[in-house]
Image: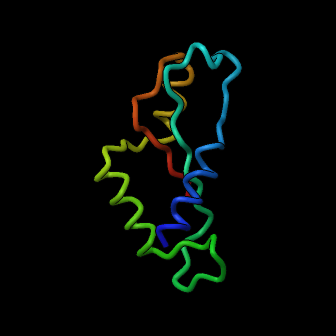
Amino acid sequence: MRKIFIALCIILLMVSVCHASISSQDRAYFPAVLMYHKLKTTPLNEFDTTPEAFASQLDWLKDNGYETLSLEDFISYTKKGEGFPEKSVMITL
């Protein structure tokens, strides 16, 4: 499970959404966006996430000082052209 979580994090960390008015030099930090499609009680493949694994991953993020951003927070930071807080992450489900 840890191996799958790490692989998922690496893949998802490479996913970025860029706003036209913010260049890579202008932003101090850009948050990771973790995309979950569906939680499944019985995983069908290595990409499926159980509710228990999801809870464990959220605990890990919290224990390691990550702050979750809502979609509204994300849009607000982007529109203002401000840097995002360090260790911020947006989670979609």
Query: Among all residues in the image, which is located at the extreme bottom?
Result: 42
Q: Is residue 45 left or right of residue 61?
A: right
Q: Is residue 13 left or right of residue 57?
A: right
Which residue appears at 60% of the width and 14% of the height? 25
Along the line of sight, which residue is nearer the eye, 93 or 24? 24
Which residue appears at 66% of the width and 15% of the height? 21
Along the line of sight, which residue is nearer the eye, 83 or 6? 6
Q: Where in the figure is residue 41, as x and y percent of width and height?
A: 51, 83
In the picture shown, does residue 30 fall above or below 38? Answer: above
Which residue appears at 40% of the width and 37% of the height? 87
Q: Where in the figure is residue 15, as x and y percent of width and height?
A: 66, 43
Q: Quadrant of residue 37?
A: bottom right
In the picture shown, does residue 49 fall above or below 43? Answer: above
Q: Is residue 83 left or right of residue 66?
A: right
Which residue appears at 66% of the width and 25% of the height? 19
Query: Among all residues in the image, which is located at the extreme right?
Result: 20
Query: How are the residues colored?
Result: rainbow
Q: Where in the figure is residue 26, as x and y percent of width and height?
A: 57, 13
Give the quarter of the figure containing the C terminus. bottom right
Q: Where in the figure is residue 73, as x and y percent of width and height?
A: 46, 33
